[in-house]
Amino acid sequence: MAQRRLHVFVNCAFDPLFQPIFDGIVFAIIRCGFQARCALEADDASESRFLKIQRIVEECRYGIHDISRTETNGAPPLPRFNMPLELGLFLGAKRYGDPTQKQKRVLILDTERYRYQRFVSDIAGQDIHAHDNDPTKAIAAVTDWLRTTSGRTTIPGGKKVVAEFADFQALLPTILAARTLHADEVQFADFASIVGTYVDTL
């Protein structure tokens, strides 16, 4: 149970446009000494996606929820509601769960600080952090939030982690080549392992 105090649920879009921010968030979490968790961590057809998300939410003290993906697509064009749904699940676990669940802490990210008022106004009063679709701003927000919320004074400032992420990105092609992985073959578990190994060298 103690280890779960270091688990961080990542709730965000999983698409190529958002990938740079997602990668930055995961890097920041692992660099800060936590374990990143998300729906992509296991591919098990015997477990429904939402049940898997519920299990992960239950196991995580911290939750990072990016609600920025509101664009419509398809016919008829509709927005995606998965991120607000999972945010609601996390907040519900904190509100109605046992004493362990009530210890949950939440960071909410969006492109603009007050944009959420136009599509999920019920969370008015929450402190929303804006990243302007900039991975470096997302990394800094996550790093500084984890340091403040966890009280772990060994976590560096956001600017340092942003610089380390830039160095990591420069080395990533070489790392992938050594693992005989092509960039489009990298799964979440691969990326988390690669980041963990890199962070151990810092």
Image: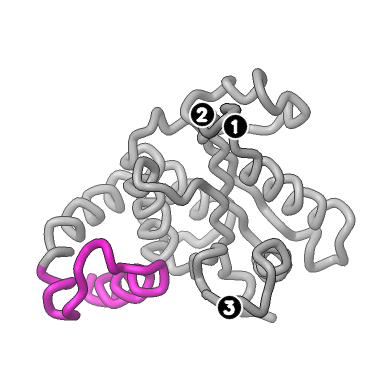
Location of residue 85 by image quarter: top right
The residue at which mark 3 appears reads as 44
Q: Which mark is residue 161?
A: none
Residue 27 position (above or below residue 130): below
* Residue type indicated by callout 2: Glu
Of residues 44 and 177, the one drawn nearer to the viewer in this rendering: 44
Q: Are marks 2 and 1 in contact (CB under 8 Å)?
A: yes
Number of dots carrying numbers: 3
The percent coordinates of residue 100 (x first, y second) are 79, 68
The residue at which mark 1 appears reads as 79
Instruction: Find out whether residue 177 is within the magenta segment.
Output: yes
Q: CA distance from mark 2 to mark 1?
A: 5 Å
Q: CA distance from mark 3 to mark 1?
A: 27 Å
Location of residue 55 by image quarter: bottom right
Instruction: Find out whether residue 11 is within the magenta segment.
Output: no
Label 2 crowd bin: few (<14), some (14–19), many (20+), radius 10 Å: few
The residue at which mark 2 appears reads as 71
Q: CA distance from mark 2 to mark 3?
A: 29 Å
- Span highlighted in magenta in the image: 174-202
